Amino acid sequence: MDSFPDRYGKWAVVAGASEGLGEAFAPALAARGMNVVLVARRGRILEDVGERLAAEHGIEVRCLELDLADSGFPGALKDATDDLELGVLVYNAASVPMGPFLDHDADAIEAAVDVNVRGPLRLVRTLAPALKERGRGAVVLMSSLSGLQGSPSIAVYAASKAFNTIFAEGLWYELTPHGIDVAACVSGAVPTPGYQERFGREVPGMLSADETVRQTLDTLRQGPRIVPGRINRFAHQLVRRLLPRRTAIRLIAKSTKHLG
């Protein structure tokens, strides 16, 4: 099998790389021989992650302190990477307003839309044309099982994850003929710092960030929708094919009712 640099290009961009799944994608890509561009708001943490990756894997790392909710981030990212052969684009960042929708203030809703919806749109529109021109590359958008149905108390987040899944599926059809693999990683619960802070409970099918990322990258060519974990794949099929929508929503409400 071709190495990731041979198949896609020498550099990967990981947006939302300071912790959790984003931080897990970076070493997984580095272990596959790719140099990485780390993007997040917390520059000091990125520098620590980057130094560790460079020391452990002997790769090049660029750290970009950018706010993914800012409409100017794609231009700054493009300027900082124009000299690189980008091969893999990973968008992981997410904002999660919790509680009843009508209790959210407008700023929280706009921030979630900026990060979760506009962010991946801007990233792909800015960087994917170069992949298409070279005739190779990959795009990974992080989604969630919560986006398979309405999810009370995290309604905006779940809806944005549904958007990313459908967006990735459309991109998959459009870009595959140009040598670009596209996948939405429809993840179950992952015990990242953000998950532990918001939910703080273990659930069936929970995978580590490292295992979620490994399965995603190992099956990247099997897009457009990747569901890591056997239990999660069962739940995915159950919700999509068997459960009535009202039943699925009521079930998810039981696990999110404490949020807010």
Image: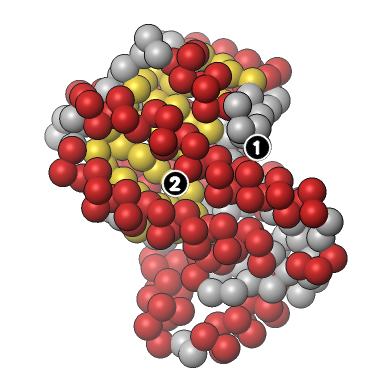
Q: Quadrant of the C terminus?
A: bottom right
SS assignment at label 2: strand
Q: Where does label 1 land, which residue?
A: 69
SS assignment at label 1: loop
Q: Residues within 10 Å of mark 2 (few under 14, many from 20)?
A: many
Checking the image for residue 141, the label placed there is: 2
Q: Is residue 224 visible?
A: yes
x%, y% of residue 234? 40, 74
Under mark 1, the amino acid is: Ala
Front residue of 22/58: it is 22
Front residue of 2/10: it is 10
Under mark 2, the amino acid is: Leu
Figure quadrant of residue 12:
top left
x%, y% of residue 62? 51, 14
State the separation of the CA atoms marked 2 and 1. 16 Å
x%, y% of residue 7? 20, 29
Left or right of 171 on screen, residue 249: right
